[in-house]
Amino acid sequence: MKVVVCVKQVPDTKGGVKFNPDGTLDRAAMLTIMNPDDKAGLEAALRLKDQYGAEVTVVTMGLPKAEEVLREAMAMGADKGILVTDRVLGGADTWATSQTLAGAIRNLDYDLIITGRQAIDGDTAQVGPQISEHLGIPVISYAQKIQIEGDSVVVERQYDDRYHVLKAKMPCLITALAELNEPRYMTPGGIFDAYKAEITTWGRADLKDVEDSNLGLKGSPTQIARASDKVRKGKGEKVTLDPSESVEYIMNKLKEKHVI
Amino acid sequence: MDFTLSKEHEMARTLFKEFAEKEVKPLAIEVDETEEFPRATVEKMAKAGFMGIPIPKEYGGQGCDVLTYAMCVEELAKVCGTTAVIVSAHTSLCCDPILTYGTEEQKQKYLPDLASGKKIGAFGLTEPGAGTDAQGQQTKAVLEGDEWVLNGSKIFITNGKEADVYVIFAITGMIEKRGRMTKEISAFIVEKGTPGFSFGTKEKKMGIRGSSTYELIFTDCRIPKENMLGQQGKGFGIAMHTLDGGRIGIAAQALGIGEGALERTIAYVQERKQFGRAIGAFQNTQFQLADMATKAQAAQYMVYKAACTKDQYTKDHKTSYNVEAAMAKLYAAEMAMEVTTKAVQLHGGYGYTREYEVERMMRDAKITEIYEGTSEVQRMVISANLLK
């Protein structure tokens, strides 16, 4: 069984956000982590490795620095890492990203593709389903449980108030929720092995069956008009009063602010 | 000379830090209050490979260097001194001597379970009358047929009741040395559950209160002949060499405790207001912090140097690391005591309460000046090398 996991290196929200003049994220200047939903997807793949001996290949598209996220995936137990990086791929929206990843995955042999539901920087939840569309395979999104049954996968798809149980024949694509599992830690020995291992690096020329018009900033139908960091709340006011006085105090404040 | 850590070491630190913050820090107060061994945390550490970091992969370990191991102990100690010493005693005092002195059979038998954390290790040298004077041993081992029969007791044993495999030292005879009769000491591997091996009192300690410090009692405890570790009569050397390595673990623990207290103090002085200003705005606070940070940094260099020197020893046994280890432990332990004391002082009255963890860190720091060789013993080791 061969599993491909798509992961994204995203800004660590604890470290603050920085932007390029064109409104895209200045990824090189920020602290980064593996996108949480993707990490759950990777963990799901690693469990298939533990259970069925699946071979796990991790693919990411990004700056050369995104190699770190592949090393991390390998330190957790992934077998191979593929970095798709090229200047012409920069500034991609979800359409161009999914075209790029699909172009990379066409070079691989796979039974299952797992992506995270969505990345914490873009929050679109589009890339996973778009990849499946480009590759012409079924997709089951929002997976909260994954099981293998013969040549099919049985997945619980999460909704607000229920879940659906869906079965799909492999090859297919699943998008994973962070709640799917508790990802394992890297191991110290795994880290040293990951840095000894070779990372495969692919550029534009290695992408299969993708038009230039679908790549990079030029191939992105979505253009960012303006982006800004979230305005942080003020420090607030802290007062210590007796319960009897505090109710009146709060009521007055709410009236003052026209909340009530 | 390059003081930059490799990318591997940086990533390992990220791992240890994340684990410590998520899994260890939330339990630190409870472990101290209840004095209960954090078994669930140890199981998580085992899963993540933390119980066999410097053990070669062929014996089920992670195959990493001593520096990585020291960084693990350091990061754990930043949030919980107890958890740090569990890893340190297990790795340095039990796995390491079996790896260094064990026969191939002993290594195959014990190391995979120890390195994977399935079993926990401990080390028994100290006795009621034999602390710094390790030659004052009373525990005896007598060979009867194919078994050694152990009688005696050991005290202050870290991981005491929780361990499964123990490296124990006992007198196996008397030998003449420079015209005087001295005790011949040998090392043994003793498994929990061996008839005649029981536990005495649990120590009620000032700090590292969750670390399960017990008395071990041997009453006609029979162990197989093949459980002797190293050659007969070489036990004292094995104990001393093991402690040289152990000191790097304890130095890393002390380093982490000091750094942990410093981190908390930096955060606190920026929040705490007196006379209308954050106390961090006062020059006294700033100068105290500067001294604390400088000493913590110096300690870190010394600990990392000692760890790297032990790595050199692994490759070339002509390299010695005992002086580096002694210096690192001496300095880091005294730094930890000084930094945690200052941290409590800068926290004022709150620092004296158990709610603010610098109080626990100060109690935890004290033991690092005592166990695995007191600061005085470290000075003896260092000066003996100067005057040889």
Image: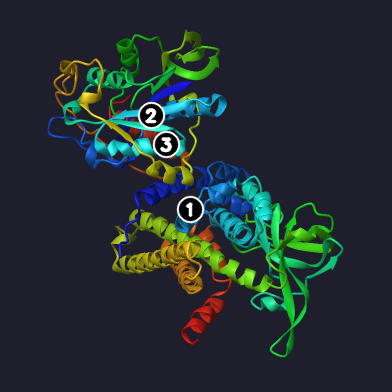
Crowd tier of the residue under label 3, counting other residues whose Cα lies within 10 Å: few below 14, some 14–19, many 20 or above: many
Locate residue A192 relative to residue A60 in the image: left or right.
right
Residue B72 marker: 1
Residue bearing mark 2: A58
Would you say B233 lies left or right of A194 here? right
Amino acid at circle 3: Met
Q: Please, which chain is the residue tagged with disc 1 on?
A: B
Mark 3 lies on residue: A74
Instruction: Tell me the CA gap for discs 3 and 2.
Output: 8 Å
Disc 3, SS: helix
Residue type indicated by callout 2: Val
Residues at marks 1 and 3, CA–CA distance in whole angstroms: 20 Å
Residue B344 visible in this rendered orientation of the protein: no
Q: Which chain is mark 3 on?
A: A
Q: Nearer the viewer, residue B328 or B240?
A: B240
Q: Chain of mark 2?
A: A
